[in-house]
């Protein structure tokens, strides 16, 4: 390990000076680590805006009737919250930040296969984000369709759906190019000796994800183009008055957007896998099972889109087929959870903040997963369709899954990315507050959903009041925890640099080089002779 | 920061480039795939209207355009062989022919569309909206799909023009021609999609 033999330290990627200076040195950089950080800063900003929108929605729901906003504002708010969180944060999420930053290092490469296309992806992301945000201010008011743009309402509303859909289309392009880049990177750039089955499991998760990005995103791309054409040219694809079929829109939308859920969760599972292995201080249990379950999830995930439409109008045969397939996805997901726990067994567990995040992830992800089975079964789904139950399930998976993993990965790789350490005690306290707030915020929504409270209304009947108060109070606790966590990390960022190349005793390649890594990562490309989680030879 | 120039991170890897192009072609096929699904659904729903509406289209123009694209696919493939044998002039000529044929395709398309517009058969027109649902959707799909395809022709032409310029100043040569190969692949894709569009719109029975 590099800690043992003192090699001279190179300037890290953060301060490295190339042809350009200042901001240009960042926004023109093709260094995968700088691009990763560009994504990180954009996403964090946008996600925080999304959190504020969410808090406002919860505040509106603190009491029945109009509290702080009108029904139309509420519609606009949940649409923007969804668009921001889904398209600008969790879909690119871990892929664009940690995938970009860590993947090349983890497979022993100097960069991704197409660094320029990688930078182009970021610009497309930025452009798409700006257009989505512009939809709030241009035209006849903010879109109010929800993030799903369901036809025929998205064709009829006078609000500015056009800009939002166009922005989402461009974001899809960005996502496709990132996926393409990663697939080629993993096929072509692995260090000598690193067969596919010596690749770290985060890489495997990204591999499955990248294929979904490639093969599913174009379908929603064309669907959004059709919505644009509908609004501009009145072609009639999804408009029943012209012979079109709105249900067809739902099919096309979910053919992408269900696999998109796996775009969100697979890299999250990958990051959690890395964390669990590192802090268990032992070899991973079931390497191949975890690796292949990523591909299995990606594959089966294509064929379950119909479970979003159980009450939309489908034949019974289609419904039970989709229901069965939905249950099948639970198998590879459970394989991962079982292998994680088996990895912990007889491990020498090091209770550090990233590990606590991983445990919190498993806890909330299980609740999210089991409630998903309730929704996957037709009979129960019909009962809770379009209620707060769905919102709770969705947030347990996407926020509790991807969001928690994002924070876990941040705490895990923070020393590597910035060469600084954060206060671990404060990190743990922050997580605890966050975790309590999260469960207080979302768990009551399961109960409210079962009681029959519909989602997406700014108002509700008086009998739902009590649990809504709990939920809103939870949102404040969650926000407190979030502030705690962010302050701690920001403070660390300002702190002094330390030589902490491998603070967690990690065994994958990124821990064998200096923190923050130099441009091009390795002086010499390492030759891999062992599995990813065995002790490595020295890396120059 | 142009670290690529100072550090040469982006070393040449033709396999990677070609793999990347193939993956991109997959995404293009899926993009059109979404439209083919929509087409199948509505053709299944309105078989008679689709059959009658298709007789409005000019089969001869469609056939000529099919032949034009097939020949252009051949010339672009020949240009790849030509560059491999170091025949720069021939490569340029063949690429120029390809671009010319693409232009010819677009000219034909322009007149074809023009006639439809004269007859009022375009999306959103009042004449079309008085026809049956099947007609509306047939012509809607016709314009959307051939329009998107024409956009791909334009992108392909631009790409081939850039490639032609690079062959001229020898940035593409017999030792390094992966960009030309990728341009050719893209052009074959554009051709391939038309091969499916032609029977679906012009040859329905």
Image (tube, coloured by chain):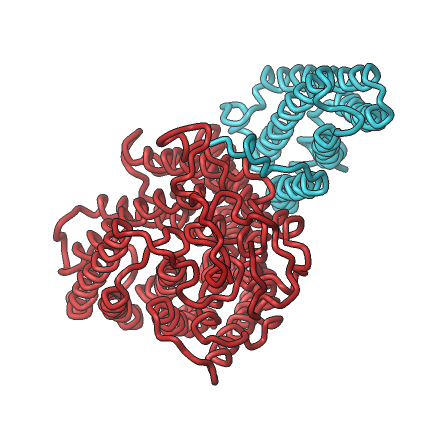
Chain colours: A red, B cyan
**Spot occupied by residue B82 in the image (x, y as percentages of width and height):** 85, 24
Instruction: Give the x, y percent position of residue A46.
Output: 32, 45
At 52% across and 56% down in the image, what residue appears? A259
Vertical relation: B138 (above or below) A413: above
Q: How many marks?
A: 0
Q: Looking at the image, is B99 positioned above or below residue A192? A: above
Q: Is residue A396 left or right of residue B97?
A: left
Q: Is residue B181 left or right of residue A280?
A: right
Residue A373 vs residue A475, the one in the foreground = A475
Tell me: A210 left or right of A418.
right
Which residue does the image show at 35% across and 75% down from the upper left? A351
Visible residue check, residue A360: yes
- Image quarter hosting the C terminus of chain A: bottom right
Residue sitting nearer the eye, A306 or A118: A118
Q: Position of residue A332 (x, y in %)?
A: 56, 71
Taking depth in this image into account, of A7 and A43 the one nearest to the observer is A7
Whether residue A309 is visible to the viewer of this picture, yes or no, is: no
Q: Quadrant of residue A155?
A: top left
- Most distant residue in the right direction: B85
Give percent across and percent down for residue A496. Answer: 28, 52
Q: Is residue A271 above or below residue A77?
A: below
What residue is shown at x 67% (from left), y 49% (from top)? A188
Residue found at the very far bottom of the displayed protein: A346
Q: Is residue A76 left or right of residue B99?
A: left
Looking at the image, residue B74 lies above or below residue A498? above
Determine the image quadrant of residue A208: bottom right
């Amino acid at each position: 390990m590099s800690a043992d033999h003192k090699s001279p330290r190179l300037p890290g990627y953060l301060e490295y000076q190339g042809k350009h200076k200042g901001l240009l040195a960042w926004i023109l950089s093709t260094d995968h680590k700088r691009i990763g950080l560009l994504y990180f800063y954009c996403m964090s900003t946008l996600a925080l805006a999304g959190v504020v929108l969410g808090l406002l929605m919860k505040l509106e729901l603190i009491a029945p009737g109009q509290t702080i906003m009108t029904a139309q504002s509420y519609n606009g708010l949940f649409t923007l919250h969804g668009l921001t969180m889904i398209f600008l944060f969790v879909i690119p999420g871990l892929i664009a930040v940690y995938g970009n930053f860590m993947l090349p290092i983890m497979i022993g490469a100097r960069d991704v296969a197409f660094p320029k296309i990688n930078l182009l992806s970021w610009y497309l992301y930025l452009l798409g984000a700006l257009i989505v945000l512009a939809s709030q201010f241009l035209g006849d008011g903010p879109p109010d369709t929800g993030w799903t743009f369901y036809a025929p309402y998205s064709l009829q509303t006078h609000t500015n759906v056009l800009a939002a859909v166009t922005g989402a289309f461009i974001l899809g392009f960005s996502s496709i190019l990132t996926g393409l880049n990663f697939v080629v990177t993993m096929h072509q750039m692995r260090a000598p000796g690193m067969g596919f089955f010596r690749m770290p499991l985060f890489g495997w998760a990204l591999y499955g994800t990248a294929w979904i990005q490639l093969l599913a995103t174009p379908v929603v791309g064309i669907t959004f183009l059709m919505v644009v054409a509908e609004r501009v040219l009145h072609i009639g694809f999804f408009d029943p008055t012209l012979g079109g079929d709105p249900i067809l829109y739902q099919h096309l939308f979910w053919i992408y957007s269900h696999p998109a859920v796996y775009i969100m969760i697979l890299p999250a599972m990958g990051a959690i896998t890395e964390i669990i292995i590192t802090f268990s201080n032992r070899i991973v249990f079931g390497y191949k099972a975890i690796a292949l379950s990523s591909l299995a999830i990606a594959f089966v995930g294509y064929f379950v889109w119909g479970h979003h439409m159980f009450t939309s109008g489908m034949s019974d045969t289609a419904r039970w087929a989709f229901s069965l397939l939905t249950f099948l996805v639970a198998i590879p997901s459970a394989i991962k959870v079982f292998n994680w726990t088996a990895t912990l067994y007889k491990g020498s567990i090091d209770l550090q903040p990233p590990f606590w995040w991983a445990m919190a992830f498993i806890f909330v992800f299980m609740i999210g997963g089991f409630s998903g089975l309730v929704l996957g079964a037709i009979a129960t789904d019909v009962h809770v369709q379009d209620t707060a139950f769905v919102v709770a399930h969705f947030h347990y998976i996407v926020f509790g899954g991807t969001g928690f993993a994002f924070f876990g990965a941040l705490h895990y790789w923070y020393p590597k990315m910035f060469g600084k350490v954060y206060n671990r005690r404060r990190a743990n306290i922050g997580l605890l507050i966050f975790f309590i707030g999260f469960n207080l915020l979302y768990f009551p929504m399961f109960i409210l959903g079962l009681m029959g409270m519909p989602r997406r209304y700014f108002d509700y009947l008086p009998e739902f009041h009590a649990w809504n108060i709990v939920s809103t109070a939870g949102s404040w606790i969650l926000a407190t925890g979030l502030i705690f966590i962010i302050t701690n990390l920001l403070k660390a960022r300002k702190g002094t640099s330390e030589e902490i190349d491998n603070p967690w005793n990690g065994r994958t390649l990124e821990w064998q080089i200096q923190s923050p890594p130099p441009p091009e990562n390795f002086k010499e490309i390492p030759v891999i002779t062992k599995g990813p989680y065995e002790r490595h030879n020295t890396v120059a | 920061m142009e670290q690529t120039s100072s550090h040469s991170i982006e070393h040449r890897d033709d396999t990677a480039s070609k793999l990347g192009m193939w993956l991109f072609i997959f995404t293009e096929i899926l993009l059109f795939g979404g439209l083919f699904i929509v087409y199948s659904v509505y053709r299944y729903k309105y078989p008679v209207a689709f059959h009658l509406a298709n007789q409005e289209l000019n089969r001869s123009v469609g056939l000529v355009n099919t032949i034009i694209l097939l020949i252009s696919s051949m010339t672009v493939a020949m240009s790849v062989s030509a560059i491999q044998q170091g025949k720069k002039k021939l490569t340029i000529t063949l690429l120029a022919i390809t671009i010319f044929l693409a232009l010819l395709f677009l000219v034909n398309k322009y007149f074809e569309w023009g006639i439809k517009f004269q007859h009022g058969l375009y999306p959103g027109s009042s004449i079309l909206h008085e026809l049956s649902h099947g007609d509306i959707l047939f012509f809607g799909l016709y314009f959307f799909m051939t329009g998107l395809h024409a956009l791909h022709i334009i992108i392909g032409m631009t790409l081939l023009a850039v490639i032609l310029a690079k062959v001229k100043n020898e940035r593409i040569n017999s030792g390094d021609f992966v960009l030309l190969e990728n341009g050719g692949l893209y052009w074959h894709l554009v051709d391939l999609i038309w091969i499916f569009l032609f029977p679906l719109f012009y040859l329905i029975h």
